[in-house]
């Protein structure tokens, strides 16, 4: 950005900020402490450093959350000062690990200062500002990386991309830290994580004793918001701590954990259509508040504090890796992950309802994987699962009570691809003709609407009560994966005949219910046979040349639905 030339006194500017490569900085390593520390550093920069820099130069704050911000400045000198302050703060607090993109748009002199926040004439300039920000992020000239190359210099034992500088000497260090050496970026992340630990303890103590949390600039904003929004019934011992690493999830859900990645749908388009600064400000505040309300609701409903071990008597059975703006990335035990996803989706939709605008919706990707699975690969799977849900919502918006909300999931096995799109393609097959027509088979209904996933989880829990048995369910899975109307059907019917009558009636009844509600309408009053669902177990017809089933999804999730919920429902 060029600040040279003659000073333009009296000019006003719209300014947009956005953190460059957030995920590259936060997930530079697989270490949970460093991921949390990086996320906390960026949140503080976004929530507090941006606002402090704005206050110092007299800027009007439109919003500052989710790694981005918008402001109005009254002079070129203020603009230059503001940009320098925030860029310096990023360099200082991240030790050069993260940077910020800055875009500016001059406000025409024909638009008066009075009432500027509600003036719709500013709309085209707000849109142009977003295009300038995209250009700034696409060409971040201030970003330059020189990779370490000296053969006699030791690299960081965590990220492996920068020169190591020192051991981690702070309190709470692991025994292995005596042997490890870290770069300045990773050291700063670890220090931040340890400081936040004690601040969370103080927030929890205040909330437990008084029932509220007073805003404090020294508190981690995310945890301050989340704990403050918890219901009074949530039991939170004052010495509750976060998991020290991913291995702590080992005993919580049979050695599996879940990574949940949620992101609001079409927020760029929604913000682009808002005509005024005030509308931008109001929408940003509503969405940001809804994200925290949704997270607190999910914690209260499905993630009670559990007994810890060693030096941690109580532990949160989850961890928040990234939250704010319009997205969430969290780790939970696998057996409650889909319930958490449903609560996030429902609460976010309800919290974003306003009298004059439709509610916003989330797309969510959930990946269920062994605790030992490399986190970098897990994060990539969650990202592709989320993107698939968002593309589906945009291409074929579902007609539901929760707008375009879709929830996608996948389970990690040894044969999995590292991309959900490849997994989905493996579950779709064209298989010759049926009655002279080309026929397609889809062995999954993913992604699911809120209503569909709620029904699927209910069916799984009832199926567990009826003890359907893993062996027979595995046989159903094998039958579905044949993806044809010969061996697939014969093997599926063979499994049905081997179930006890009560089990068989349950499976058939549920299958016909799904078929009736999911397949394309084809009823003709002059043809009585069309009044019934077109079912060829384990398939139901969806139109004249497409067959679908949810049974593979049922089998994949069967072991990942907590038994506790089943017992409570008995």
Image (spheres, rainbow, N blue to C red):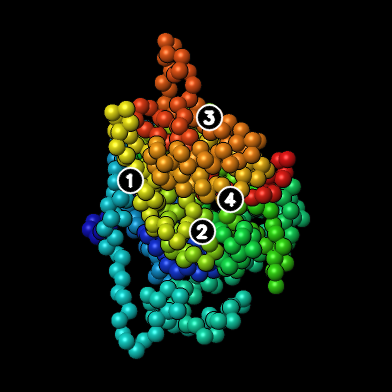
User: As displayed, is residue 406 above or below residue 34?
Assistant: above
Q: Quadrant of residue 394?
A: top left
User: Which residue is located at x 27 percent, y 52 percent?
Assistant: 135
Nearer to me, 214 or 77: 214
Sequence order check, earlier mark of 3 and 2: 2
Secondary structure beneath disc 1? Answer: helix
Q: CA distance from mark 4 to mark 3?
A: 22 Å
Residue linked to disc 3: 512
Q: Are marks 2 and 4 in contact (CB under 8 Å)?
A: no
Q: Secondary structure at mark 2?
A: strand
**Secondary structure beneath disc 3?**
helix
The residue labelled by disc 1 is: 130
Number of the label disc, if any, that sits on residue 470:
4
Q: Which label number is shown at residue 537?
A: none
Q: What residue lies at 33% left-to-right and 34% top-to-bottom?
A: 439
Q: Earlier in the sequence, mark 3 or mark 1?
A: 1
3 vs 1, front mark:
3
Residue density around tag 1, few if under 14, some if 14–19, many if 20 or more, within 10 Å? many
Residue 563, percent across and down?
67, 49
Circle 2 is placed at which residue position?
369
Rendered location of residue 508, percent (x, y): 56, 33
């Amino acid at each position: 950005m060029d600040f040279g030339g003659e000073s333009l006194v009296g000019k006003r500017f719209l300014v947009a900020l956005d953190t460059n490569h957030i995920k590259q900085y936060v997930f530079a390593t697989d270490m949970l402490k460093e991921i949390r520390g990086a996320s906390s550093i960026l949140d503080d920069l976004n929530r507090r450093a941006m606002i402090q820099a704005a206050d110092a130069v007299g800027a009007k704050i439109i919003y500052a959350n989710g790694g981005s911000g918008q402001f109005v400045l009254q002079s070129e000198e203020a603009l230059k000062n503001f940009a320098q302050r925030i860029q310096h703060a990023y360099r200082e607090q991240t030790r050069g690990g993260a940077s910020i993109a800055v875009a500016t748009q001059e406000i025409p002199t024909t638009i008066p200062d009075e009432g500027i926040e509600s003036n719709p004439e500013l709309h085209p300039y707000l849109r142009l500002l977003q295009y300038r920000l995209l250009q700034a992020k696409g060409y971040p000239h201030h970003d330059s990386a020189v990779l370490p190359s000296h053969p006699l210099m030791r690299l960081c034992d965590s990220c492996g991309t920068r020169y190591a500088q020192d051991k981690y000497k702070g309190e709470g260090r692991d025994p292995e830290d005596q042997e490890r050496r870290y770069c300045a970026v990773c050291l700063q992340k670890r220090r931040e994580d340890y400081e936040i630990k004690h601040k969370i303890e103080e927030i929890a103590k205040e909330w437990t004793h008084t029932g509220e949390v007073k805003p404090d600039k020294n508190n981690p904003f995310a945890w301050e918001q989340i704990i403050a929004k918890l219901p009074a019934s949530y039991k939170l011992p004052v010495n509750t701590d976060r998991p020290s690493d991913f291995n702590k999830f080992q005993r919580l859900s049979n050695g599996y954990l879940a990574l949940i990645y949620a992101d609001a749908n079409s927020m760029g388009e929604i913000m682009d259509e808002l005509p005024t600064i005030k509308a931008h400000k109001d929408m940003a505040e509503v969405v940001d508040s809804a994200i925290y309300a949704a997270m607190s609701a999910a914690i209260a409903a499905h993630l009670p504090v559990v007994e810890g071990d060693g030096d941690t008597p109580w532990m949160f059975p989850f961890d928040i890796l990234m939250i704010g703006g319009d997205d969430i990335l969290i780790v939970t035990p696998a057996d409650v992950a889909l319930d958490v996803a449903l609560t996030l989706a429902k609460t976010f939709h309800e919290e974003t309802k306003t009298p004059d605008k439709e509610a916003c919706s989330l797309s969510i990707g959930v990946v269920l994987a062994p605790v030992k699975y490399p986190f970098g690969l897990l994060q990539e799977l969650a990202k592709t699962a989320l993107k698939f849900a968002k593309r589906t919502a945009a291409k074929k918006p579902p007609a539901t009570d929760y707008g375009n909300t879709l929830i996608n999931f996948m389970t990690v096995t040894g044969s999995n691809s590292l991309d959900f799109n490849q997994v989905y393609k493996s579950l779709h097959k064209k298989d010759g003709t049926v009655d002279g027509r080309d026929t397609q088979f889809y062995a999954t209904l993913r992604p699911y609407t809120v209503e569909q996933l709620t029904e699927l989880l209910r069916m799984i829990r009832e199926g567990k009560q009826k003890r359907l048995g893993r062996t027979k369910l595995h046989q159903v899975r094998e039958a579905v994966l044949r993806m044809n109307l010969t061996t697939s059907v014969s093997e599926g019917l063979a499994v049905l005949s081997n179930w006890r009558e009560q089990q068989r009636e349950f499976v058939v009844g549920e299958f016909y219910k799904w078929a009736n509600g999911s397949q394309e309408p084809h009823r003709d009053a002059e043809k009585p046979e069309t009044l019934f669902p077109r079912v060829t177990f384990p398939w139901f017809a969806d139109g004249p040349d497409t067959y679908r089933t949810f049974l593979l999804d049922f089998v994949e999730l069967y072991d990942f639905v907590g038994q506790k919920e089943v017992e409570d429902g008995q």
